[in-house]
Amino acid sequence: MSEGTIQPDRPQVRTGDTPDLFSKFDPVIAMREGLLASGVEDPFSLVMEKVLSPTRAICNGRETILLGTYNYMGMTFDPDVVEAGKQALADFGSGTTGSRVLNGTYQGHRDVEDALREFYDMDHAMVFSTGYQANLGIISTIAGKGDYIVLDIDSHASIWDGCKLGDAEIVPFKHNDIEAMEKRLRRIPEGAGKLVILEGVYSMLGDIAPLAEMVAVAKKYGAMVLVDEAHSMGFIGDNGRGVVEQAGVMDDVDFIIGTFSKSVGTVGGFCVSNHPKFEILRLVCRPYVFTASLPPSVVATASTSIRKLMQGSNKRAHLWENSKTLHQGLKDLGFQLGTDTAQSAIVAVIMPDLERGAGMWEALINEGLYVNLARPPATPANMTLLRCSLCAEHSEEEVHTILGMFERAGKAVGII
């Protein structure tokens, strides 16, 4: 179940008491208190005191290998990217202090949208202040009251929130189940607007969607298709355009959503499309119109990074080798993984429960390795998992060092 599908229980209010608006968070409070009472370090409050490179940082006073940052292509310290940001900061100042439809469009905003159009070979590109806002804005604007959204049950929270904001009828289907998706589409009233939302790579388990088959079914029923490629841009596909490119459905997808906070190495979100009426969204999309635009330094780093990713074939090849090595190595050690084979730069290690997952996380941080601890309700099927996000800048030696850390920590905690 996606984090976007979870609705907290209503607070229990005693007669005569003032309603406590925080009561709905009591289960989360109890979970956190129970976790900390067991003596483990808080896995959700880690501070990076100094970042040394895309793969190393100082955490808790010691040098730590980073395996949970989504910095897939390692662009955060690229010299050209950093220099572009410095120059834009000097030339244009620290911020725009306005929205894109008022004073918030600088030359850099046009440049980064040009870079996106070039990268994806599409007619239109629209940049948002975050990837969350890109989903929130595009989905809520194009699918509204009386329309139907058919989406994977494991969709990201930003997708679910975009559906809710737009007030469309929401029709979820079982994760990656083509037959279930078709059944939902078949039941939608004739003549209703239909939008199918999929993700190229699902961020919790790192598995990919069967996009070729799913897009074909969507088009059979006259639905528009939106694919979130946040976790595959720059890495998957011959040109790094994502699973849509790998599956050969670039021309059949209506909208591609992405983010700058993963492979691009900065912050921001975007949508690219070939729809002839796309540009009108700049005037009717509320999360675009009513928020400040990205700072000039950010869009300068993004456009430089995107153009460098166009020539990133060697980095993509090395990242694939890292992913395959880590996946197979963890499997050989006896860990339960989220996928049978390496499908993306994400390798999910399934834990027996939250307590032992937190213990494993702490054992790894003490080894000098940072990974993400993911827990329900954010994870599918109430799983607790350690999510590893590989980087193209991880060396082959580092990946083998990581495997040694997992082996020692896994044995110490009793996971393997």
Image (cartoon, grey):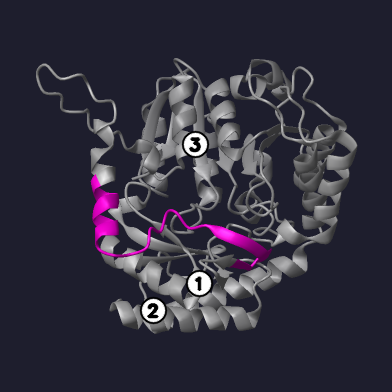
Question: Which residue type does callout 3 highlight?
Answer: Ser
Quadrant of the rendered structure where residue 48 is?
bottom right
Could you tell me if the residues under marks 1 and 2 are in contact, i.e. CB atoms within 8 Å? yes
Q: CA distance from mark 1 to mark 3?
A: 29 Å
Element class at badge 3:
helix
238 and 32: which is toward the camera = 32
Q: Quadrant of residue 169?
A: top left
Tell me what residue is drawn at x 37 percent, y 40 percent. 173
Residue bounds of the magenta highlight: 30-57
Which residue shows up at 54% across the image and 42% down it? 216
Question: In the rendered structure, which disc, 1 or 2, sits on the residue that comes first in sequence?
Answer: 1
Label 3: how many Cα within 10 Å (few below 14, some 14–19, many 20+): some
Residue 374 higher or lower than 339, as above or below: above
Residue 143 x, y percent position in the rendering: 52, 22
Q: Which residue is mark 3?
A: 158
* Residue 250 counted in the magenta span: no
Q: What is the crowding at mark 1: few (fewer than 14 residues within 10 Å), some, or many (at least 20)? A: many
The residue depicted at 70 percent of the width and 24 percent of the height is 278
Secondary structure at badge 2 equals helix
Cα gap from disc 2 to disc 3, whole angstroms = 34 Å
Picture disc at residue 369: 1
The three-letter code of the residue at mark 1 reads: Leu
